Image: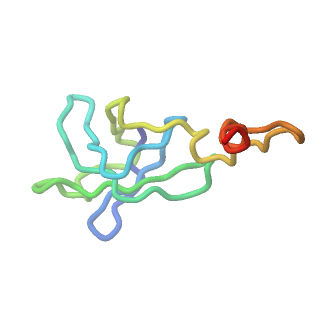
Amino acid sequence: MGKFMHACEGEMVCESSNVKIPHFGASIYLENKTSVGKVDEILGPINQVFFTIKPSEGIQATSFKSGDKFYIAPEKLLPLERFLPKPKPAPGTMTKVKKLVKTL
């Protein structure tokens, strides 16, 4: 999912290395599948995503070093398109809802 940058107020600040966006509250793991915490905040512009991890009990944010990698389950990722504006339909085209309303 990303790599550790630094600790801040007891949490871990990470830079995303994934093209998808993590769910809030998704579990984050080390390579050996040890849980280290959950996604707390998502920061930055859409083309350079950062996120914070609230560590699990017993995990210290300061115990990691810059560049340490973190992982996430693939089903806990959202496509980038979900956060981009939807293209407007071409003029003169009707959506399904408008067609349904006109038929009623």
In the image as oriented, which residue stretches furthest toward the right? Answer: 91
Residue 93 versus residue 100: which sits nearer the camera? 100
Q: Is residue 6 above or below residue 100?
A: below
Determine the residue positioned at 26% across, 38% down. Answer: 29
In the image as oriented, which residue stretches furthest toward the left? Answer: 58
Q: Quadrant of the C terminus?
A: top right
In the image as oriented, which residue stretches furthest toward the bottom? Answer: 9
Determine the residue positioned at 34% across, 61% down. Answer: 7
* Percent of width and height locating residue 33: 20, 31
* Percent of width and height locating residue 80: 57, 40
- Image quadrant in which you'd find residue 1: top left
Q: Is residue 59 left or right of residue 17?
A: left
* Percent of width and height locating residue 26: 31, 45
* Percent of width and height locating residue 9: 31, 71
- How many marks do you count on the picture? 0
Determine the residue positioned at 26% across, 66% down. Answer: 10
Q: Is residue 76 left or right of residue 44?
A: left
Determine the residue positioned at 70% across, 38% down. Answer: 103
Residue 30 versus residue 97: which sits nearer the camera? 97
Residue 70 versus residue 24: which sits nearer the camera? 24
Residue 88 versus residue 81: which sits nearer the camera? 88
In the image as oriented, which residue stretches furthest toward the front? Answer: 104
Q: Is residue 48 left or right of residue 15?
A: right
Q: How is the image coloured?
A: rainbow
